[in-house]
Every structure is written in C-alpha cells, then in structure tokens.
C-alpha cells in the first residue's frame, strides 16, 4: 500500500489587500511671514518638523512644533499654521488615505494629536519619514525610476505599520462592553467580505446573515443592530456596503481585472447590478472611477500642498 505524503504548515500570513493613496507628500522651507489658512480634508496627515518652530491650530487647540515634533491630524480636523520664530521653518508633510476599515479603526483609537520629538511615536516614525524625505528631494529635480518608486511603496508600508504599532502601544483607551461587541460585529462583517471575495457569492439573505452574527455573540438581531448603530453610527448592512465599496475601489485602482470579473468576485450576479450599485455609492460608473483613479490628481482641497 502506498503511503500518502504528509505536509504541515510551519507558518502562514493572511492575504494582503489594502488600498491606500499617498497624496501631497512634500518638504518645504518657508520664511517667517508664511501662513496657511484654516482648512480640513478627508485624509490623514503626518506633519513632521525638521527645522525652526511653527504654530499649528487643530480644532481650536494650539500646538507649538519644534524640531522632531510630529502632529498626527485625522480626517475632518480643522487646522491652520503660522511661523513661531523669526527665521522661518522647514517641515515635511505626508497625506494619505486608507480604504481598510480595521486599519482606520486602529488609527482612530487614540485621540492624541501632538507627539514631541522624544516620544515613542515620533522616534518610531523618524526612519521611514527620513527615507521618504530623501526620496522626495530626489523627485524634485528628476522623475523617480521604477526602483525608487518601489522604495517609496516600501517606506510607506513601513511608516503605516510603525504608526499603527505605536498608536496601539500608547493608547490607554479601554473598550466598553458595548464597544467590544460592536468591534466583534465589524470583524465578522469584514470576514464575510473576505468570504465573498474568495467564493464570489453571498449564500445567505441579509436577515439570516444578521441572525448568524447575533447567534455567535449570544444576542438578538435587534441588539446587534442597536449596539452597532450606537458605536459606529450606522447599521451593520451599511457597514457591509462600505466595506464592499472599499474593496471594489481597491480592485479597480490596483488591478487590471475586468469589471465583469470584479463584479463576480464581489458577489454580484451581473455586471449591470454591480455598476448600478457602485454608481449609487459614488455617483459615477466603475469604468469612470477607474479612468479617474489613473489620472494624476490636481492640487485641491483633497490634495493639499502645504
């Protein structure tokens, strides 16, 4: 009798499917008269001080930045800046957006904005920021070759990984029972999207899907909906739609898969159904979104240059 071969995993990592945009990354040296007016945008911003001193007002709170100090500004926060010394200052700014609900949840756990130069977060991010700064100065005089572009991607992933790691260590927030339950619901929703992505179908009705989540948490469906709304401000079904939209945008931006194929991967029976739903979410068709995402972004409210 032939003996069947055996195999065992020695380790395994989850699939990596993250959609992010790096926008408005630049270093600038300004004089003492330079100011930037109050504004807000839909991106995260890391503002790193390299020389001199400046004042940044974030949501009405004044922060004075010196060399090495870092500000982490979240989407929707109103902020403005002025020089705080007679010699001007030099800063490095990174704006980014991430279409990943679990990642954004970690970014938003800690509400601190200002991190001094000797803080663990500022020191933990300094290496990646320095790498990006050096690449940015090279890009000013000539286009970056493909090899340098990959170094930008590597530095960005290192930066995001360090940012989440440091925030999770420094945060002192203790989740309430309600917040803990809502997070478990969110994780199950994200798992369901991963299932759809792998199997290309939704096998259950919305009602059964909510009932299964409720049963796993020993709650009623009405409790699941109520708790999730109280913590996340929207229904679980809307959260699922947003997660599907983020995955659709990632696939349209980062792959060459046909729209038919993407629709199938996300559980839609027809391209037409997917296109109607995508347009209802975003206001434009998937084909238009793909074209726009491949065009260089113009400077504007969501592509800051300060």
Image (cartoon, rainbow, N blue to C red):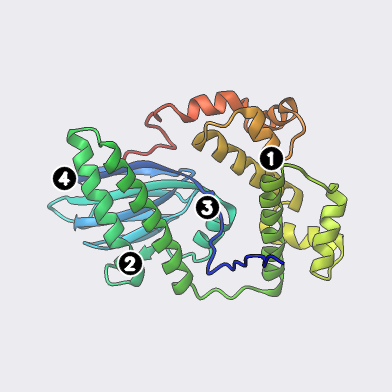
Marks 4 and 2, Cα distance to the nearest angstrom? 29 Å
Q: Which mark is residue 16?
A: 3
Please say if the residues under marks 4 and 3 sit with CB atoms less than 8 Å apart. no
Q: Which residue is mark 1?
A: 266
Q: Earlier in the sequence, mark 2 or mark 3?
A: 3
Q: Quadrant of the N terminus?
A: bottom right
Q: In the rendered view, would you say 120 is above or below 210?
A: below
> Which sits in the foreground, 48 or 203?
203
Dot 3, crowdedness within 10 Å: few (<14), some or many (≥20)? few
Q: Which residue is mark 2?
A: 124
Which of marks 1 and 2 precedes in the sequence?
A: 2
**Of tags 2 and 3, which is closer to the observer?**
3
In the rendering, at what x and y percent does residue 230 appear?
72, 60
For label 4, the SS is loop
Q: Secondary structure at mark 1?
A: loop
N-term mark: 4 or 1 = 4
Q: Counting other residues with Cα less than 10 Å from the Cα at mark 4, is it few (<14), some (14-19), or many (20 or more)? A: some
77 over 256 or under it: above or below: below
Residue 243 higher or lower than 298, as above or below:
below
Residue 262 in view in this figure: yes
Mark 4 or 2 closer to N-term? Answer: 4
Residue 137 quadrant: top left
Mark 2 vs mark 3, CA separation in Å: 23 Å
């Amino acid at each position: 009798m032939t003996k069947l071969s055996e195999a065992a995993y020695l380790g395994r990592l989850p699939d990596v499917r993250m959609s992010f945009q790096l926008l408005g990354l630049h270093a600038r040296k300004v004089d003492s008269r330079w100011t930037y007016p109050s504004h807000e945008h839909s991106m995260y911003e890391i503002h790193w001080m390299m020389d001199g001193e400046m004042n940044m007002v974030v949501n009405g709170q004044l922060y004075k930045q010196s060399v090495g100090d870092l500000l982490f500004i979240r989407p929707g926060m109103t902020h403005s800046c002025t020089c705080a010394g007679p010699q001007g200052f030099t800063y490095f700014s990174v704006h980014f957006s991430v279409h990943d609900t679990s990642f954004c949840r970690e970014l938003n756990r800690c509400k601190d904005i200002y991190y001094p130069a000797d803080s663990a977060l500022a020191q933990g991010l300094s290496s990646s920021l320095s790498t990006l700064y050096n690449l940015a100065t090279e890009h000013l005089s000539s286009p970056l070759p493909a090899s340098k572009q990959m170094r930008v991607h590597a530095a960005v992933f290192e930066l995001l990984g360090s940012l989440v790691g440091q925030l999770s260590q420094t945060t002192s927030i203790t989740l309430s029972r309600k917040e803990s339950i809502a997070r478990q619901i969110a994780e199950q929703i994200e798992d369901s999207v991963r299932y759809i992505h792998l199997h290309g179908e939704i096998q259950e009705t919305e009602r059964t899907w909510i009932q299964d989540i409720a049963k796993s948490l020993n709650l009623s469906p009405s409790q699941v909906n109520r708790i999730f709304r109280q913590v996340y401000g929207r229904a679980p079904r809307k959260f699922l739609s947003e997660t599907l939209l983020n995955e659709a945008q990632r696939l349209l931006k980062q792959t060459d898969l046909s729209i038919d194929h993407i629709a199938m991967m996300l559980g839609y029976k027809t391209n037409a159904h997917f296109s109607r739903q995508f347009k209802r979410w975003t206001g434009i068709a998937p084909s238009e979104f793909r074209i726009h995402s491949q065009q260089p972004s113009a400077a504007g409210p969501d592509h800051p240059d300060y």
